[in-house]
């Protein structure tokens, strides 16, 4: 052992590891010989090698060690909290600036929003007049276009949702009228940082939260009234409103990939697939009541006479029809319905007089990239003769002219791309405000 005088703190001892020093010396001499390197290996060099000279470990009882550890931890935590306070102030300042900017933009949007449809109608009429088209202002096609635009331009629901998100910052104290720190050493309910985590983060009483909410709402914009009345009462809202199912009508020319797409969509939970009736001969692998309800001509005509079909049509010499009762029953119970149908049938459903079906309707057209690609797909399918393919292509060209009649049009790509786009349509339809029914 070697005694080391360390000033007023007394004398400390160093331990010398002789075996380790000897190993270093032998290794250095061997390396010097191998490299034929000149120089002298001194005791100073060896003593500087790691581990040769060290303070011996001292056994301490936990009770003796804890005060030093406690002081070190408290000092580290105090430094950490100060750093977080500084960061919190900067973050809060930035958040408040951004939230003010968002509220300002929301106010501007609310100013312009009521006149969007009116301006669109004026621009549309002006362009029609300049183009010299024989379309009157009360033309059904023009009114339909304006109605479709109005439905897509309605962002009222999105504005309320965004304003509600802004209000939520008050609940979580991201912004607070009295404090601009996200995590302070002492929160506004009195829990100190060195209390237990449960005390530090769990003492936010209901009264304190309500006080924070009142302070925020008093300084906020138009969200105040609507938030008090609706957004803070999700359980009441769920009891106050209900919704019926959505009727998804899918059409596409033969060979556009509709069958494969529909098979994938049918796996969606809480979705009823309406199996169409037909008089055509089943194809290989098709199962009755799963792919189609295969009926004789006499059975089909009898159902037509009874009014069982919401629509029926003749396509390529065969009869097709969609039963009304399963659709209505599922829509009324809140279950979405999927119908795979041709453009004739879709037009009949679109113009039917049933208000339930009219309100539930969301029709989608699957558009093939072009007729040549459609021909390739039909040839690859290998289920039609050349004459049948030519007939289907001629029908497809006529059907593709009706894409504007549908609310949505998907330009067909891969199966996965088409499926993703269709699911996005399903999600968008489910959030429409007009689908909520007040009990």
Image: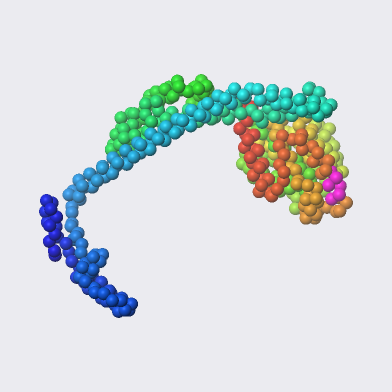
Q: Is residue 163 above or below residue 337?
A: above
- Who's the residue at 30% across and 36% down the image? 193
Quarter in which the C terminus is drawn: top right
- Who's the residue at 34% across and 40% down the image? 83
Query: For the magenta stretch, what is the residue range?
Result: 389-395
Q: Is residue 380 above or below residue 97?
A: below
Q: Based on the displayed image, in which of its 4 quarters is residue 303 positioned?
A: top right
Residue 199 visible (yes or no): no
- Spot occupied by residue 219 in the image (x, y as percentages of width and height): 45, 22
- Spot occupied by residue 25 in the image (x, y as percentages of width and height): 24, 73
State yes or no: residue 318 in magenta.
no
In this orientation, which residue lies closer to the viewer: 256 or 159? 159
In this orientation, which residue lies closer to the viewer: 437 or 414? 414
Dominant secondary structure, magenta: helix
Residue 285 appears left or right of 386: left
- Who's the residue at 34% across and 29% down the image? 188
């Amino acid at each position: 052992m070697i005694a080391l005088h360390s000033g007023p703190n007394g004398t400390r001892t160093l331990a010398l590891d002789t075996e380790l020093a000897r190993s270093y010396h032998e290794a250095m001499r061997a390396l010097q010989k191998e490299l034929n390197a000149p120089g002298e290996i001194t005791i100073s060099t060896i003593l500087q090698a790691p581990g040769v000279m060290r303070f011996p470990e001292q056994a301490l009882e936990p009770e003796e060690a804890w005060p030093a550890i406690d002081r070190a931890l408290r000092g580290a935590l105090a430094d950490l909290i100060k750093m977080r306070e500084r960061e919190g102030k900067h973050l809060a300042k930035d958040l408040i600036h951004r939230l003010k900017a968002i509220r300002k933009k929301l106010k501007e949007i609310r100013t312009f929003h009521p006149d969007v449809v009116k301006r669109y109608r004026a621009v549309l009429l002006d362009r029609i007049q300049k183009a010299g088209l024989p379309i009157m202002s009360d033309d059904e096609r023009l009114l339909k276009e304006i109605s479709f635009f109005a439905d897509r331009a309605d962002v009222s629901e999105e504005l309320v949702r965004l304003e509600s998100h802004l209000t939520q910052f008050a609940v979580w104290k991201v912004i607070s009228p009295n404090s601009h720190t996200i995590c302070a050493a002492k929160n506004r309910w009195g829990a100190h940082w060195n209390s237990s985590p449960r005390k530090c983060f769990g003492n936010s009483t209901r009264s304190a939260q309500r006080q924070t909410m009142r302070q925020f709402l008093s300084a906020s914009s138009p969200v105040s009234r609507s938030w008090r009345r609706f957004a803070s009462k999700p359980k009441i809202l769920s009891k106050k409103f209900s919704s019926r199912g959505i009727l998804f009508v899918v059409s596409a020319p033969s060979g556009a990939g509709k069958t494969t797409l529909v098979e994938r969509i049918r796996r969606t939970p809480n979705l009823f697939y309406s199996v169409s009736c037909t008089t055509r001969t089943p194809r290989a692998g098709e199962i009755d009541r799963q792919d189609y309800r295969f009926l004789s001509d006499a059975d089909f005509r009898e159902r037509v006479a009874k009014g069982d079909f919401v629509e029926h049509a003749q396509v390529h010499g065969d009869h097709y029809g969609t039963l009304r009762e399963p659709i209505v029953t599922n829509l009324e119970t809140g279950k979405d319905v999927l119908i795979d149908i041709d453009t004739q049938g879709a037009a009949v459903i679109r113009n039917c007089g049933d208000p339930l079906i009219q309100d539930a309707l969301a029709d989608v057209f699957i558009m093939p990239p072009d007729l040549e690609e459609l021909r390739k797909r039909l040839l690859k399918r290998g289920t039609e003769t050349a004459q049948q393919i030519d007939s289907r292509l001629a029908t497809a060209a006529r059907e593709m002219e009706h894409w504007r009649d549908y609310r949505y049009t998907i330009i067909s790509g891969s199966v996965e791309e088409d499926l993703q786009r269709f699911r996005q349509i399903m999600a968008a339809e489910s959030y429409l405000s007009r689908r909520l029914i007040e009990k």
